[in-house]
Amino acid sequence: MTSEVPAEASRAPASPPPPPAVPPPVPAPAWQTLQVASANVLNLALPGRAFYENQEPYGEAEYERKTTWLAGMLARLEADVIGVQEVWDEAALKATVARSGLRRHTVHVPGAEHGASGTPRVGLVTRLEIEELVSLADFAPAETVSLPEIGPVARFERPVLRARLRVPLGPALHVLVVHLKSKRPKYLQDADGHVLEDRDDPAVTARATMRSLLQRAAEAAALRRIVVQIIGRDGPHQGEPLVLLGDMNDSAHAVTTQMIAATQAVAYDRGARDVALYHALDVATEPALRRDHFYSHIHQGWPELLDQVWVSEELVAASRFALGDVRRVEVFNDHLHESRERWRSDHGFVRALLRLRR
């Protein structure tokens, strides 16, 4: 008599389940890097050329010393795109760049090709191909502001420079180079530029400072329109990153600066991200060392970061529209503690390393 074997025992052991499919490795993004910088060069002019009535022109020796120093600074920056402020003569900047050792860089300072008059100009030094370059002096008609005791202000004191650059293997890059109205009191003057007010009267100085603030605010509002025209999602340049390089003459969180960037609106309005600018120092993916060293100007003993780099959402790593990022930001400011001779600049130079996906 045979015993019955349970059915479970007669079955062959089950085959182990197949291993889960391993997804193919995600290729690391291919990056190309760009270095952009802002440099206020402090009244760069040819020798013998008068630029302000209360300042002597540069002599040959002083001009040689200034361009030699500045050429060394540009060589240290080694940037692909440099926004420059306070240029009186384009020829002086071209000579400086030529002696810096930078290769394949072109120099453009609209309004200073034959010498600027009234105020210095902003310029662009770049090795990238320029597709468009426009100097913007006038406000839109609705943006005119009336300054007390002076009248309507309808243009930038120092015209804004707007460029569209071709990046190899990447999207077009928009660049704005700016130099906003300073905090220096704007006293009433006669037709020859002589001050008509008592500069020793604190109340007069307060009102003159108010005029400067109003003018800087008017420039900021007009510049905001230019920014939105470039980065607006419904505009012709959708998806093309913007970099703003400039001497803002105020801090990154000041009202006038935020009129341009509108970064603070992002905290309560997600839709504001599309038309906001982001301070490169705040969105850099490589942490900055000793942020307290980030200043570009010292006024009466107080350090400030007046010279700034701002980027649109396409260069913010956390954005779903990101085409790249800001890797790091550096300030070249050691010379601010060396001396006050005018052959140096009284501003530090700011440089940002950008990465763009190929």
Image: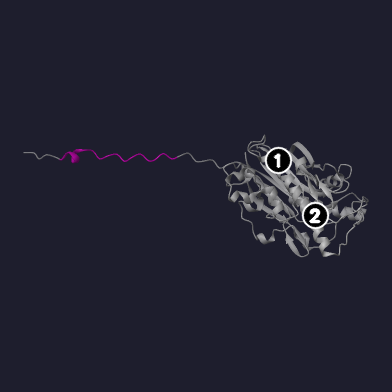
Q: In what element is the residue under mark 1?
A: strand
Q: Which contiguous range is marked in magenta?
A: 6-22
Front residue of 242/236: it is 236
Q: Amino acid at mark 2?
A: Arg
Magenta residues, dominant SS class: loop
Is the Cβ of the residue at disc 2 closer than 8 Å to that at disc 1?
no
**Residue 231, position in %: x, y?**
66, 40
- Residue 307 falls left or right of residue 205: left
Which residue position holds label 2?
211
Q: Is residue 64 magenta?
A: no
The image quarter containing residue 61 is: bottom right
**Residue 184 seen in the current view:** no
Relative to the observer, which residue lies in front, 136 or 338?
136
Judged from the image, the secondary structure of the residue bearing numbered disc 2 is: helix
Question: Which residue is pictured at 58% across the width and 46% down the height?
Answer: 270
Q: Say which mark, if any, is on residue 210.
A: none
Q: Quadrant of the N terminus?
A: top left
The numbered dot on residue 174 is: 1
